[in-house]
């Protein structure tokens, strides 16, 4: 019988292979293997909510965790419903470079694309 821990909670955020490879490369560059990619939603921006994407060494109470090819993505319990079904990708084109979030839950976004409701 397996014992349930607080880290058994999962989320429905998808990290593409390209994004997972970029996260791995960034962590190797930093020489860190104790960091996870945290996805959070906070009040702000011109449409009401804004994404936060950053490396975190902490586990918070209620965090949902999911692994992708050796990269752990964590989402705090308040953000889980807002990002459920979202896909995190990495773009490297002339027009855009960086992580992108495609979120089917966003009712609309602002012109700058940084916030949603």
Image (spheres, rainbow, N blue to C red):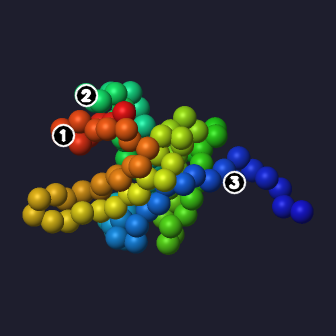
Instruction: Provide residue 85's location: percent of width, then percent of height.
Output: 49, 53
Which residue in the rendered view is the most extreme toward the right? 1
Kindly identify the residue that appears in the image at 18 percent across and 38 percent down.
111
Q: Which residue is mark 1?
A: 112
Q: Which residue is mark 3?
A: 8
Q: Quadrant of residue 51?
A: top left
Instruction: Provide residue 110's location: percent of width, then percent of height.
Output: 23, 36
Tell me the crowding category of disc 3: few under 14, some 14 to 19, or many 20 or more residues within 10 angstroms, Cα based. Answer: few
Image depth: mark 3 or mark 1 in front: 1
The span from disc 3 to disc 1 (Cα, nearest Å) is: 36 Å
Judged from the image, the secondary structure of the residue bearing numbered disc 2 is loop
Q: Quadrant of the C terminus?
A: top left
Q: Which residue is mark 2?
A: 46
Residue 93 left/right relative to 116:
left
Q: Can see residue 21?
A: yes
Residue 38 left/right relative to 63:
left
Judged from the image, the secondary structure of the residue bearing numbered disc 3 is helix
Instruction: Provide residue 29's location: percent of width, then percent of height.
Output: 32, 65
Of the image marks 3 and 1, the number of the one nearer the N terminus: 3
**Does the residue at mark 3 contact the one at mark 2 (Cβ under 8 Å)?**
no
Kindly identify the residue that appears in the image at 89 percent across and 63 percent down.
1
Of the image marks 3 and 2, the number of the one nearer the N terminus: 3
Kindly identify the residue that appears in the image at 60 percent across and 48 percent down.
64
Near-viewer residue (4 or 102): 102
The span from disc 1 to disc 2 (Cα, nearest Å) is: 9 Å
Q: Quadrant of residue 2?
A: bottom right
Near-viewer residue (117 or 69): 117
Of the image marks 1 and 2, the number of the one nearer the N terminus: 2
**Does the residue at mark 1 contact the one at mark 2 (Cβ under 8 Å)?**
yes
């Amino acid at each position: 019988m397996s014992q349930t821990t607080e880290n058994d909670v999962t989320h429905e955020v998808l990290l593409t292979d390209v994004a997972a490879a970029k996260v791995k490369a960034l962590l190797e560059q930093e020489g860190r293997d104790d960091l996870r990619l945290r996805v959070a939603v906070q009040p702000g921006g011109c449409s009401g909510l804004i994404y936060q994407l950053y490396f975190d060494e902490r586990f918070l109470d209620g965090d949902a965790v999911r692994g992708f090819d050796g990269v752990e993505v964590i989402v705090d319990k308040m953000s889980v419903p807002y990002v459920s079904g979202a896909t995190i990708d990495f773009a490297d084109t002339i027009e855009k470079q960086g992580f992108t979030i495609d979120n089917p839950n966003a009712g609309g976004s602002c012109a700058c694309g940084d916030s949603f409701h």
